[in-house]
Amino acid sequence: METDRPLETGARLVMEMRCGALAFRLIAEVRSVKADPRNFAGLGFVGISAEGLKNLKSLIKINAQQSPPPESTNEG
């Protein structure tokens, strides 16, 4: 994630994710940081509400239905 200000490893954040009509909040923990010259943070998601999990599963399901199946690489 890119951010305007530096974050410290171990800090916890509440993030809101939106995709179309679906929105949910996640709790994320900063796992790594990098600044050169912008600030970047690697996050691990550590918590989500029951309603948020329901919305995330809906988003994954919608995305899976819209994505074409992977191409087969079997060679005869």
Image (spheres, rainbow, N blue to C red):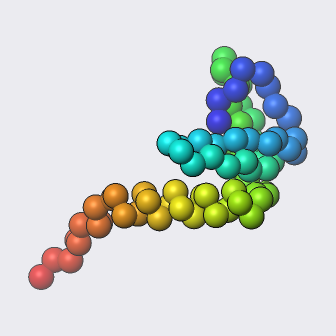
Quadrant location of residue 68?
Answer: bottom left
How many tags in the picture?
A: 0
Say whether residue 71 is left or right of residue 51: left
Residue at the extreme bottom? 76
Residue at the extreme top? 37
Which residue corresponds to the image point at 36% horizontal and 64% vertical from the top-left? 65
Which residue corresponds to the image point at 57% horizontal and 64% vertical from the top-left? 57
Question: x and y percent of residue 8 in the render?
Answer: 86, 35
Question: x and y percent of residue 31 in the render?
Answer: 77, 47
Question: x and y percent of residue 64 in the render?
Answer: 41, 63
For the residue pair 29 and 31, the one nearer the viewer reads as: 29
Say whether residue 38 is left or right of residue 69: right
Question: x and y percent of residue 47 in the render?
Answer: 79, 58
Which residue corresponds to the image point at 74% horizontal and 64% vertical from the top-left? 50
On the question of residue 4 being in view, the answer is: yes
Residue at the extreme front? 21
Rendered-image quadrant of the C terminus? bottom left
On the question of residue 31 being in view, the answer is: no
Which residue corresponds to the image point at 85% horizontal and 44% vertical from the top-left? 12
Asked if 46 appears above or below 22 in the picture, the reply is below
For the residue pair 59 and 9, the one nearer the viewer reads as: 59
Asked if 31 appears above or below 37 in the picture, the reply is below
Rendered-image quadrant of the N terminus? top right
For the residue pair 15 and 74, the one nearer the viewer reads as: 15
